Amino acid sequence: MKTRKKGLLVTTLMTLALFSLVLGACGTKQEASNTGNGAGSNEVAGNQLEAIKKAGVIKVGMMGTYPPYNFLNDKKELDGFDVDIAKELAKRIGVKPEFTAQEFSGLIPSLQKKKFDAVISQVTITEDRKKAIDFTEPYITNHVNIIVNSKTNDITKLEDFKGKTIGVGLGTNDESYLRNEVLPKVGDFEIKTYDDVITSLKDLNSGRIDATINNLYALKPIVDKNGFQIKAVGEPIKSDQAGVAIHQNTPELKEALNKALKAMKEDGTYKTIFKKWFSEEPKE
């Protein structure tokens, strides 16, 4: 009997010990889960500026096919106004820029997926975009004109778009402007979208589209290089301001970039970069 009772006691003690281990494991898993959803994840996502400084690199997305703003030079390196702005901003926050080029329509989705820390590629500041991403203060104002073939005389204003085929960059603010503002007011016309500016100008030059809209800074180097027979008509139809696009809820990064932009304008660095690429002083 004593042997039997002793065996039962050992079995009971082993069961209790095993039960305690299971409870302990569940408690550990719950604590780990709480840590992942609480301070731990907030710390990772919280201060992007500190993360960038720790890495020593700010990852920047841009088109790379939009001279003189951003393009591949003869050395196959990204160059242009946006590139120089990005390099100067990176220097002033104490890091190096790392550039990635892709089609404009994919830049904001890639920023949202955190493939970049910022997009510096003539991203126009709009209320719709502010719902998904954030912006610094504007770093340039662009005036947008109607552009037609040199032989075209029947398009001088937006109302003349009716019944025509108008080219525009895919995913750009100009595309939204045509679809949401011009089309309802003017009446039916076809909108043809492009992933890069040069292809739209080739189609305009050959008569495959009737007009496009863009700013003259962007068109001049392409026209000069390719000899396209095109012209701007009428007064600017609108003015857009571009800012550095960044993730939402990154106030430290936004403040640092705004501070750097302000200092660049105050010490003349911005004016130097602007004159380098546009051969004139900034008007704003």
Image (spheres, rainbow, N blue to C red):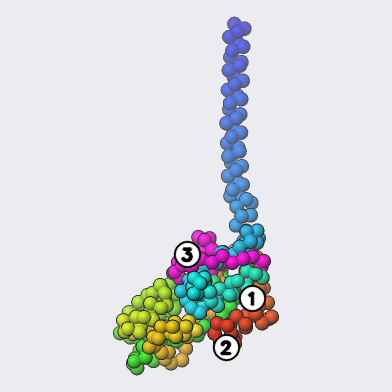
Highlighted magenta segment, given as a residue range = 93-119
Q: Nearer the viewer, mark 1 or mark 3?
A: 1
Helix, strand or loop at label 1? It is helix
Q: CA distance from mark 1 to mark 3?
A: 25 Å
Name the foreground residue: 33 vs 190. Answer: 190
Residue beneath disc 1: 261
Name the residue type under label 2. Glu
Name the residue type under label 1. Leu
Question: Which label is found at residue 280?
Answer: 2
For the image, the number of numbered tags is: 3
Q: CA distance from mark 2 to mark 1?
A: 19 Å
Q: Residue at x 44, y 69 (%)?
A: 103
**Mark 2, other Cα within 10 Å: few <14 / some 14–19 / many ≥20:** few
Q: Nearer the viewer, mark 2 or mark 1?
A: 2
Quarter of the image that includes the N terminus? top right
**Pointers 3 and 2 in contact (C-beta within 8 Å):** no
Quarter of the image that includes the C terminus? bottom right
Helix, strand or loop at label 3? It is helix
Q: Position of residue 39 (x, y in %)?
A: 64, 51
Question: Which label is found at residue 109?
Answer: 3
Regarding residue 232, the answer to whether it shows in the image is yes
Helix, strand or loop at label 2? It is loop
Q: Quadrant of residue 252?
A: bottom right
Query: Tag 2 or tag 3, which sits nearer the N-term?
Result: 3
